[in-house]
């Protein structure tokens, strides 16, 4: 792994037992899908989440006022891991004026006419805002790797050498994320690690409950046949792209309350580590405020 270049001021990622190591040693087999034994129960997790949401609201106000950084949260997971519900729960207290979510599904014809980073680059959050990607450019080294036939629609230059495509895309992603970090975007990437048994249970729940049936697709079951391929793709992807300026967190996803509380905690502690503060007024601005106060006071 290439070390950060001297002289560059990288944001130190927050500590977490779920943070993916930067040295390529991450193992899917060792990554838990259930909370640790010491974890609080579901009720306590929900209480913690509520408190953390209140803190996130305060942080967002300062982020927006300072207008020097953006936050980008990327969520990747297999179907039924809980991406949508986690985003909804964790971000529920944020001001919509400073927050945006984009879901990336099958690429359009226009998107296929560009490089694989184009469609997400056009949706990056502006300074002062929080952006969330529900799936992302990582689909290009995950689902496309499991289904390389999808490359045909991308009309890549010839000769196309599959053995070189994935290392090249990993390098492009690392460079892209490093550029964003240097430009003021703080990147947090969450892989929601659901077990195969729990995914099966949630699929059955979708089938049996009318209000959830719209979420289910026959392709969801078909993709389970590629479970081992996906696990191999995720393991290499996380090892190749977890870096200090764009860390991955492998969050146990079999318990939704614990998963949501863990994501919120990492986001809140990242905010707290950034040293955000409201802008300081210049002497001229202070004089303007004093003048405005004087004029308004006379009106009464």
Image (tube, rainbow, N blue to C red):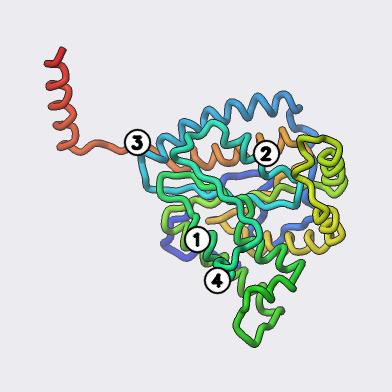
SS assignment at label 3: loop
In the rendered structure, find residue 209 and report the number of the disc placed on it: none
Instruction: Work out whether mark 4 precedes mark 2 in sequence or the reverse, and give the earlier one.
Output: 2
Which class describes the residues within 10 Å of circle 2: few (<14), some (14-19), or many (20+)? Answer: few
Left or right: 30 in relation to 9: right
Q: Pick whichever of labels 3 and 1 is earlier in the sequence.
A: 1
- Mark 4 and mark 1 lie on one chain; the one further toward the N terminus is 4
Q: Residue at x 42, y 48 (%)?
A: 69
Q: Earlier in the sequence, mark 1 or mark 2?
A: 2
Per the image, the residue denoted by label 2 is: 85
Q: Is 153 in front, or is 82?
A: 153
State the residue position of label 3.
278
| Residue 207, horizontal then vertical, whole percent | 85, 41
Residue 115 disc label: 4
- Report which residue position mark 1 lands on: 121
Give above or below for 27 relative to 84: below
Q: Is residue 263 above or below residue 176?
A: above
């Amino acid at each position: 792994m290439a070390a950060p270049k001297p002289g560059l001021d990288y944001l130190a990622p927050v500590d977490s037992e779920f943070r993916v190591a930067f040295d390529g040693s991450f193992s899917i087999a060792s990554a838990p899908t259930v909370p640790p034994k010491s974890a609080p129960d579901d009720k306590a997790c929900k209480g913690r989440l509520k408190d953390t949401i209140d803190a996130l609201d305060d942080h967002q106000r300062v982020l927006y006022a300072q207008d020097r950084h953006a936050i980008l949260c990327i969520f990747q997971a297999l179907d039924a891991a809980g991406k949508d519900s986690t985003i909804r729960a964790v971000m529920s207290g944020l001001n919509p004026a400073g927050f945006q979510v984009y879901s990336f599904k099958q690429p359009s014809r226009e998107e296929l006419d560009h490089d694989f980073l184009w469609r997400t680059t056009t949706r990056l959050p502006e300074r002062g805002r929080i952006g969330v990607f529900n799936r992302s450019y990582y689909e290009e080294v995950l689902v496309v790797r499991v289904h390389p036939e999808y490359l045909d629609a991308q009309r890549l230059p010839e000769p196309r050498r599959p053995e070189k495509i994935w290392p090249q895309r990993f390098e492009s992603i690392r460079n892209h994320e490093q550029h964003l970090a240097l430009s003021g975007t703080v990147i947090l990437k969450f892989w929601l690690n659901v077990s195969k048994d729990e995914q099966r249970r949630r699929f059955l729940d979708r089938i049996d409950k009318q209000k959830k049936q719209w979420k289910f697709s026959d392709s969801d079951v078909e993709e389970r046949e590629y479970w081992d391929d996906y696990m191999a793709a995720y393991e290499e992807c996380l090892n190749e792209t977890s870096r200090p300026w764009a860390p991955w967190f492998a969050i146990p996803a079999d318990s939704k309350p614990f998963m949501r509380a863990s994501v919120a905690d990492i986001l809140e502690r990242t905010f707290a580590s950034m040293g955000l503060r409201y802008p300081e007024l210049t002497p001229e601005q202070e004089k303007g405020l004093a003048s405005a106060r004087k004029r308004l006071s006379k009106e009464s």
